Image (cartoon, coloured by chain):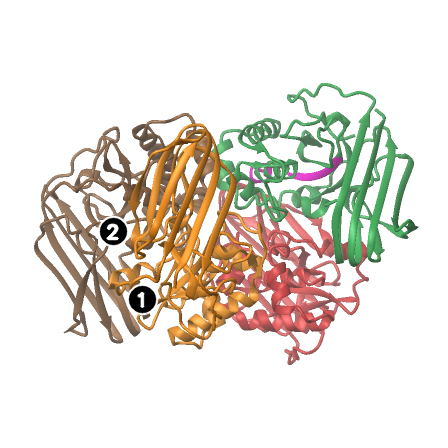
Chain colours: A brown, B orange, C green, D red
Amino acid sequence: MKRDVSARIVLNVSEPADLVFAIAVARQYESVDERFEASVGGEPVPHHELSDAHGTRLHRLQAGAGELVVEYQASVDDAAPVPDAGETELLVYSRPSRYAESDSLLPTAAAEFGGITQPSDLLAAVSSWVGTELAYVSGSSLVTDGAVRTLLARQGVCRDYSHLCIALLRSLGVPARLAAVYAPGLSPMDFHAVAEAWVDGRWCAVDATTLAPRSTLVRIATGRDAADTAFLNIVSGRAELVDISVSAVADSLPYDDVTQLVSIT
Amino acid sequence: MKRDVSARIVLNVSEPADLVFAIAVARQYESVDERFEASVGGEPVPHHELSDAHGTRLHRLQAGAGELVVEYQASVDDAAPVPDAGETELLVYSRPSRYAESDSLLPTAAAEFGGITQPSDLLAAVSSWVGTELAYVSGSSLVTDGAVRTLLARQGVCRDYSHLCIALLRSLGVPARLAAVYAPGLSPMDFHAVAEAWVDGRWCAVDATTLAPRSTLVRIATGRDAADTAFLNIVSGRAELVDISVSAVADSLPYDDVTQLVSIT
Amino acid sequence: MKRDVSARIVLNVSEPADLVFAIAVARQYESVDERFEASVGGEPVPHHELSDAHGTRLHRLQAGAGELVVEYQASVDDAAPVPDAGETELLVYSRPSRYAESDSLLPTAAAEFGGITQPSDLLAAVSSWVGTELAYVSGSSLVTDGAVRTLLARQGVCRDYSHLCIALLRSLGVPARLAAVYAPGLSPMDFHAVAEAWVDGRWCAVDATTLAPRSTLVRIATGRDAADTAFLNIVSGRAELVDISVSAVADSLPYDDVTQLVSIT
Amino acid sequence: MKRDVSARIVLNVSEPADLVFAIAVARQYESVDERFEASVGGEPVPHHELSDAHGTRLHRLQAGAGELVVEYQASVDDAAPVPDAGETELLVYSRPSRYAESDSLLPTAAAEFGGITQPSDLLAAVSSWVGTELAYVSGSSLVTDGAVRTLLARQGVCRDYSHLCIALLRSLGVPARLAAVYAPGLSPMDFHAVAEAWVDGRWCAVDATTLAPRSTLVRIATGRDAADTAFLNIVSGRAELVDISVSAVADSLPYDDVTQLVSIT
């Protein structure tokens, strides 16, 4: 399926800044007509590309003070199958992480999902439970919030839904990770985040928000949690977000049958 | 410098368990006479070895119910120089992690170390401050404790000292990670943990406990924090620690000049 | 019903200490043969008595260094009915407190008990839920733990069970407080703590541990949470608990029908 | 000194609500021309007054759906001296409370103020430290935040400054409590909160924000922390704040010498 994605980010760079963007589609795609451009006051700002885990591509640049505009666009088709996860990778994604504190949530996970043993059943149960227990409330969480606070607050945004799913799944023995994605059909349009759980020998998308069909998602960044996938990381200097616009359009928006396992392609 | 290290771990496996041990010296060493053996009731238990990040070696095994004895020993000489860290690696070790919540500690780090800019000065200042502010109290922390709780409690063990150093350094823009090590000279002898900070183009050991000379440390596992370096990870099943003994002997125990940068070799 | 209670507390006073004990039965009882004695090295230590809220009686003393022995005993009959709570009192016990963070637990309370409206039904539902969800594990909690951490840990002791009940009840609009008590029938014998909820115009005991019949409880201290009812408060100086023994004997140990509302008498 | 104070609060009552306001001057004042009025759609809403601790006066009313307007005004002169605190009261205000977790902050307090022993010196040191370490940032904290989070965030509003002062002082053995006040000279004008510490036999105001002279403060509510002094408590029902305006004018605004002990009069 063909998808056109783009993002435009405007930052007020108040002190010269070292910035890393994770907004390009992952290396798994053969993107056509891809473009990443940055400029301050109309003058191009050079950048270079870095490879992070699982085909994540980072764009890094040094921006002087002023209004920085970053524009990205790409058209992608379905990605080739991703190779199997290695054994160590599955151990890594079973470990607690900054925003998916599976160690602290182990008692909760055991109490809520104690009798379920099959990974596919756990995926379904956790996703349904998180979707039911949480209320989607824009702006309700802080960037330092992890799954523990999300559980207590019973509200959050896509990042929080994903972190809670990831933490519970890991507590239950199912490797899980976070994927930042473009999500055709999402409304209001924005960057999106979903969990991925290792079930039946592949990484399956888990989106407890059910805000966009999983089969049209386009992968950007993949990692342990939002610490690994933030669309912007200010390494040094100072920059404030002025404006952000994201678009993601697919040929079609298929019905998403939540009983089916779906991978990001 | 030649060092002889060994560990003996006895577990009561109360339900058949999938266990991962991180007790072998890292791949960077050419170890001589290395031996890893596991047995239940005198019967050998097969295991296999996995590669984790930075030369970390994991040993995984499936143990039936009973008393599991795991024995490891190795003799190592100085390791060859470790290749330079890649650019992405330094970004990864600047991110907050489960037990080194550099995002939550940013205001504290800025308040305590605000005027210091050189990474080597920051390493010295953070290490000295953590060593002064914390009291080493065996058994004073929980496995779910991270740097935030250590800071509040002002006490901990080597793991906690390291996490607080790592979190503060990351907050201040210095990439930092955790190394589990054998530590000749440590008393009482046990597995040890130190931070590593990226200063002057190399990973430098930071041990705010000052309990063992840094130059004799032997690397076991390396990662973001203790989530990546635990000597035992119970993937499934149930096992309780019955006994653990660790030894680490070096040809000599040099004086550790805390003003010098020292890497783990 | 007649009950005989006693406590013997031995402290190692390592620095002269200002100590407050809450071990005497509350003022509501007409106790017979009551005795409170303190001594260091066989020499009596003078003390004086203070009145705290709801008839709580505190004994305060200044102990020099040495081994302090405090002994208390009393025989009590059923207490006279306690006067109705004032309107302000009910507001006070609806507020969040140190170890019963009803503000932070509001989303959890709403999710778990959303459809229930009658205070007596809420008392039954909360008590049953807490008793089912938590495991009683001696030594599993810290003195700084409140209801939030108890909920996450799903384990605790009587203090933790009570705090979680109190926090949930307050979140749901039911005033609730903590009572430290002597509890005939408790095994192993110790000081005990129960919640009290304002239902049907009186304070009703809530003991989710179901470890002792509520009708035989003898009230010691009453307050917002354990901050108000600790059996020992070290105001200054330094003292370590060496030994504690508590006894509480009732004429009979009636069956405790958990469906009945019971007040502490 | 004569002071004129007033407040006007507009609420959107979306579900009939049981509301408690703490906006009237404390009972210690002989107020002249005092007025408390509530109306929905121009129709008066009856209310009654309750007495809370230390002369705090609460106004409680049942409001139907609609726009509720509450108006209060009073003119007060200096209050008569407040009677000495009782011994139990000082014990109560030494205990940890919901938003002043002195138990969790004990290690921090000991590390920062370890050598200081005189209560007046502790008051000065804590007030100065909190004023220096925190940044006053409107809207930077949540209503569930206590002193621990304020310390970590190093920012907050008057409520947070006060809670941190209170918690640290209690940790150091100085009884401390919270006072909600009208504060002539405050800019922008709003309800204000200060700590009170028991020093030299009286309650002395501690305002680490130094935003208003302490000698002109007019006491509203007094308690353990903001749980006891919130200007509005929604006991049941649902109401959203639409608008709030506060005024407080004094004959003069004296220079506030922070080296002097000042009580609220």
Q: Residue B114 got which mark?
A: none
Figure quadrant of residue B79: bottom left
Q: Amino acid at mark 2?
A: Asp
Q: Residue at x 81, y 62 (%)?
A: D84
The residue that disc 1 covers is A235
Where is residue D191? Give x, y as percent. 58, 62
Which chain does the numbered disc 1 sit on? A
Q: Amino acid at mark 1?
A: Val
Q: Is residue B188 visible?
A: yes
Q: SS class of the residue under badge 2?
A: loop
Is residue D108 covered in magenta?
no
* Crowding near the residue tagged with mark 1, few <14, some 14–19, many ≥20 C-alpha atoms within 10 Å: some
Q: Residue at x 78, y 63 (%)?
A: D82
For marks 2 and 1, give the CA distance: 23 Å
Foreground pick, A207 / B239: B239
Quadrant showing the C terminus of chain D: bottom right
Q: Is residue A225 above or below residue C85?
A: below
Where is residue B200? Give x, y as percent. 33, 73
Where is residue D72? Give x, y as percent. 61, 58
Where is residue B209? Give x, y as percent. 52, 63
Range of residues picked out in magenta: C169-181
Marks 2, 1: nearer the viewer:
1
Q: SS class of the residue under badge 1?
A: strand
The residue that disc 2 covers is A190
Which chain does the numbered disc 2 sit on? A
- Viewed as shown, does residue B121 lie left or right of C210? left
- Viewed as shown, does residue A229 lie left or right of B194? left
- Viewed as shown, does residue A25 lie left or right of B259? left
Foreground pick, D141 / B201: B201
- Earlier sequence position, callout 2 versus callout 1: 2
Foreground pick, B48 / D62: B48
Foreground pick, D123 / B127: B127
